[in-house]
Image (cartoon, helix red, strand yellow):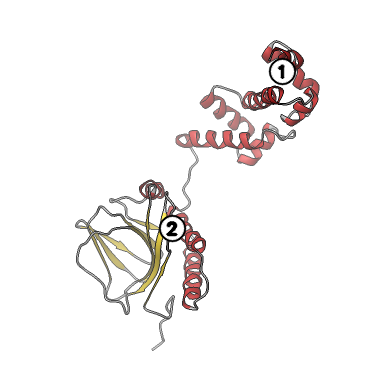
Amino acid sequence: MEKKEFLLSVPEKVHFFLNRREKDIALLSTGYNNFHFVKPQFFPRKQQYCTLHFVVEGKGTLNIEGKLFSVGKFQAFFLDTESSFAYYPVKEDPWEYVWFDFCGEKVKEYMQDIGFSKEHPVRNCVNPQKLAFDFANFFQNTEKQSAVSYFEGAALFYSLCAAAYGKKNNSGFLYENDTVELIRRFIEKKYLQDDFTVEYLSEAMHLSHSYLCKIFKEKTGMPVIAYLNKLRMERAEELLKSTELSAREIAYMSGYRDYEYFLKLFKKQHGITTSAFRKNL
């Protein structure tokens, strides 16, 4: 009979993360269980910390307050601190899984964003083979007494979260508000570059020029180029107030490549020249 290959050479493994003070989410420990050897617990219980599990092999059953869910290979399941639960492997094909204990102020929000709930505590994972490989390397390093940092564990935790979140189709009208917010943030990050254009913006956001301009104006009431100039003018005003730089230097430092164009826009917006604006201060 062919010998079965397992993720790790030991039945179970636990690695603790000590003295963590993160507020949003703090990882407390991570571990591995192989139910070919570990005795399962069938009784219902509650737990002090939240847990996220990733099934590497096998099948099992999750019982949350009397509602049963099947959990199989390459699926993740989440358990909170409020629900009474029990979970156990299928006898004919017992599972191997890895898990994280964690707590924090944003746990509920993060898990809901991923898609976990009492009604839907189980999710399929994308790129599960890579995830299993990364977990194997992590735990093998702990077996060899290698130094394993908290951040390596955190990287695995968020990789599992990303895998459980999956590849959602976020195109469509319902997500235009999010798209506009991303556009706004990108402009705010890049507006000081003198070669920043709406064409560059649309390429970076992977949107057509016309669609980007349309949804931005619909949601903000302002054309993209007007919002760009608003940020640049606010920057120019601040530099006129707080420095003795020349108007030409301020124009360039505010993202304007064309000095004359800057002067024209400034006078149109303020009704006075830059020198008069500074004098009035």
Question: Please, is residue 83 above or below residue 254 in the view?
Answer: below
Q: Where is residue 130 in the image (x, y as percent from the top left)?
A: 51, 66
Looking at the rendered image, the quarter that the C terminus falls into is top right
- Classify residue 27 as left or right of residue 245: left
Q: How crowded is mark 2: few (under 14 residues within 10 Å), some or many (20 or more)?
A: few
Tell which of 223 and 246 is nearer to you: 246
Direction top: furthest residue: 271
Observer-side mark, 1 or 2, equals 2
Tell which of 228 and 172 is nearer to you: 228
Q: Which residue corresponds to the image point at 77% horizontal and 30% vertical from the top-left?
A: 252
- Classify residue 156 as left or right of residue 53: right
Tell which of 171 and 164 is nearer to you: 164
Check disc 2 and report its element: helix, strand or loop. Answer: loop
Q: Where is residue 147 in the image (x, y as percent from the top left)?
A: 52, 71
Amino acid bearing label 2 = Arg
Q: Do the residues labelled 1 and 2 touch (CB within 8 Å)?
A: no
Query: Where residue 266 is drawn, which disc sits there?
Result: 1
The part of the image, by quadrant, that contains residue 76 is bottom left
Tell which of 264 and 103 is nearer to you: 103
Query: Where residue 20 is drawn, which disc sits there?
Result: 2
Q: Report whether residue 227 is seen.
A: yes
Query: Where residue 230 is drawn, which disc sits there?
Result: none
Q: Where is residue 236 in the image (x, y as percent from the top left)?
A: 70, 25
Question: Please, is residue 265 above or below residue 7 in the view?
Answer: above
- Classify residue 87 as left or right of residue 131: left
Check disc 1 and report its element: helix, strand or loop. Answer: helix
Q: Report whether residue 55 is seen.
A: no
Q: Which residue corresponds to the image point at 45% horizontal and 35% vertical from the top-left?
A: 174
Looking at the rendered image, the quarter that the N terminus falls into is bottom left
Amino acid bearing label 1 = Phe
How far apart in space, not on screen, are marks 1 and 2 (Cα)?
51 Å
The part of the image, by quadrant, that contains residue 204 is top right
